[in-house]
Amino acid sequence: MKCPVCHYQDTKVVDSRVATDGSSIRRRRECLKCGFRFSTYEEIEILDLTVIKRDGSKEVYDKDKLVRGLKKALEKRPITEEKFKQLVNSVERDIQALRKNEITSNQIGQIVMKYLRKVDQVAYIRFASVYQSFKDLQTFQKELDKLTAGKKKAKK
């Protein structure tokens, strides 16, 4: 790891701890030349995963694309950065649990919707309306009805 101050190539790890999100490791490092201390984070990365899109085309899995979609759905919603990271980690953990080299965009969408429904119902509806390409108001209303019916069952 290169020092961010003097750009010296050698640093040593002074301390390692599990980060607050539970899915990454925070490492305190010290430059062996100038003594500057800084933190780095190590997290799981999904490698060698291909996403099969609706049109049949394939592309390499891109975490940034997942993050952008979730941020769009959660825009102006009361969610902490910590909760957002947990959401992303939960989605990626479910993707990894499938133990496949290829996954459809539909499968990813279903996993995202499962977690968004629990985290923020407005964001869930936003995501579902784009993901499921709601054609009209009736389709939108059906999804709202499912959401409110689930809420009524949970209260009983």
Image (cartoon, rainbow, N blue to C red):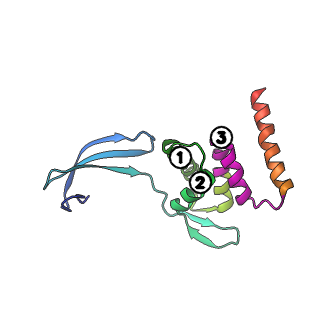
Disc number at residue 84?
1
Helix, strand or loop under label 3: helix
Q: Give above or below for 45 relative to 17.
A: below
Split into 4 quadrants, where in the image is the C terminus? top right
Residue type of the residue flagged with mark 1: Phe
52 lies left or right of 85: right
Q: How many marks?
A: 3
Label 3 crowd bin: few (<14), some (14–19), many (20+), radius 10 Å: few
Which residue is the extreme one toward the top? 156
Specify start and end residues of the magenta stretch as a single range: 111-136
Q: Give the x, y percent position of residue 121.
A: 69, 43
Q: CA distance from mark 3 to mark 1?
A: 12 Å
Q: Are marks 3 and 2 in contact (CB under 8 Å)?
A: no
Residue 104 is inside the magenta segment: no
Relative horizontal placement of residue 109, taking residue 18 as reference (left or right) = right
Helix, strand or loop at label 2? It is: helix
Q: Report if residue 121 lies within the magenta region.
A: yes
Q: Quadrant of residue 21?
A: top left
Are discs 2 and 1 less than 8 Å apart at CB?
yes
**In this figure, which residue is indicated by the disc labeled 3?**
118
Is 56 displayed left or right of 29 in the figure?
Answer: right
Image spot of residue 86 (x, y percent): 52, 44
Q: Residue at x 70, y 68 (%)?
A: 54
- Which image quarter holds the N terminus? bottom left
Q: Residue furthest front?
A: 76
Q: Which residue is mark 2?
A: 70
Lower sequence index among marks 3 and 2: 2
Q: Secondary structure at mark 1?
A: helix
- Give the dominant element type of the magenta stretch: helix, strand or loop: helix
